[in-house]
Image (cartoon, helix red, strand yellow):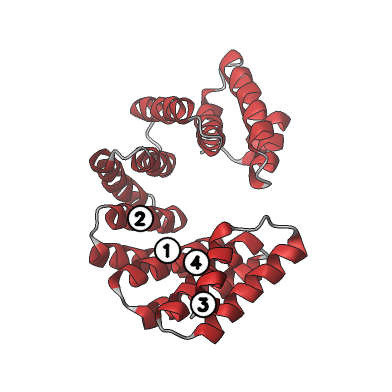
């Protein structure tokens, strides 16, 4: 991979847009950066540009564009191997397949990614890989395997200090525990998720983790604690102008009838 210093200003602008979640702006910048890299024969820059263009396209729902970018990276790897970039690319291809319902194909990409990321000692990407593998096994109904994979992901996220990964994966683990009927474990996982999202200043993530807690307490017939979680969600929505979620209203109505 090239360092950011090796890239054009338009590529760096695209990275800023990407980190801010402004995906249309990011895609425009990366498309221009790709044209410049091809015209200037800067092949050492192509993989980074293609990876980020693919990510921006995937975020915008353009799976075919994303897939084309990722497959080009795999083709470039045959000329000059780059295990770290290819590992990340294989994870992204696995995600595209999982989201499209191609579960067997997604698993093949994920397993190949695991080998490449282990070769490159890329712990950050490995944490993301195991989170996604967990989601795959959860979709296949293999909840025990999913729980084990989420725990592995959490270990990697702790090792690298990846707060976003910890917040998301604790929430995913909470959902898997709920499906298994392990409410106490789910409560612990959702509490961790809520704490991490709060530290990140991610109100949408915090609200979603609180929904998981509210579900745990409703199943436990603890009406007061469930309503307390829903009141916290309402406070978050007012504070940061998040749109209301109909699930919250439905749950409040259910609880008040009990």
Tell us which disc is closer to us: 1 or 4: 1
Regarding residue 158, the answer to whether it shows in the image is yes
Where 62 sits versus 214, above or below? Answer: above
Residue on which disc 3 sits: 257
- In space, the residues marked 2 and 1 are separated at their CA atoms by 8 Å
The mark that comes first in sequence, 1 or 4, is 4
The mark that comes first in sequence, 3 or 2, is 2
How far across and how far down the image is residue 257, in percent? 51, 77
Residue at figure coordinates x 58%, y 77% from the top left? 229
Mark 1 and mark 2 in contact (Cβ < 8 Å)? yes
Residue on which disc 2 sits: 135
The mark that comes first in sequence, 2 or 1, is 2
Q: Element type at marker 4?
A: helix
For disc 1, the neighbor class at 10 Å (few under 14, some 14 to 19, many from 20) is many
Q: Element type at marker 2?
A: helix
The mark that comes first in sequence, 3 or 1, is 1
């Amino acid at each position: 991979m090239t360092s950011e210093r090796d890239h054009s200003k338009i590529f760096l602008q695209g990275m800023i847009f990407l980190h801010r979640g402004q995906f249309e702006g990011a895609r425009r910048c990366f498309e221009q950066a790709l044209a410049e890299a091809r015209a200037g024969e800067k092949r050492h820059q192509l993989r980074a540009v293609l990876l980020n263009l693919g990510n921006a396209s995937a975020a915008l729902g353009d799976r075919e564009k994303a897939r084309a970018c990722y497959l080009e990276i795999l083709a470039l790897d045959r000329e000059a191997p780059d295990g770290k970039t290819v590992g990340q690319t294989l994870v992204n291809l696995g995600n595209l397949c999982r989201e499209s319902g191609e579960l067997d194909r997604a698993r093949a990409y994920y397993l190949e990614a695991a080998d490449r990321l282990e070769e490159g000692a890329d712990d950050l990407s490995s944490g993301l890989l195991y989170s996604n593998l967990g989601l795959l096994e959860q979709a296949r109904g293999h909840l025990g395997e999913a729980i084990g994979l989420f725990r592995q992901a959490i270990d990697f996220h702790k090792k690298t200090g990846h707060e976003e990964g910890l917040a998301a994966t604790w929430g995913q683990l909470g959902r898997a525990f709920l499906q298994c009927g392990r409410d106490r474990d789910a409560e612990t996982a959702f509490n961790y998720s809520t704490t991490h999202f709060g530290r990140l200043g991610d109100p949408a993530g915090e609200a979603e983790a609180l929904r998981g807690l509210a579900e745990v307490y409703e199943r436990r017939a603890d009406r007061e604690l469930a309503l307390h979680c829903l009141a916290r969600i309402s406070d978050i929505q007012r504070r940061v102008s998040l749109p209301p979620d109909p699930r919250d209203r439905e749950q409040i109505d259910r609880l008040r009838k009990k």
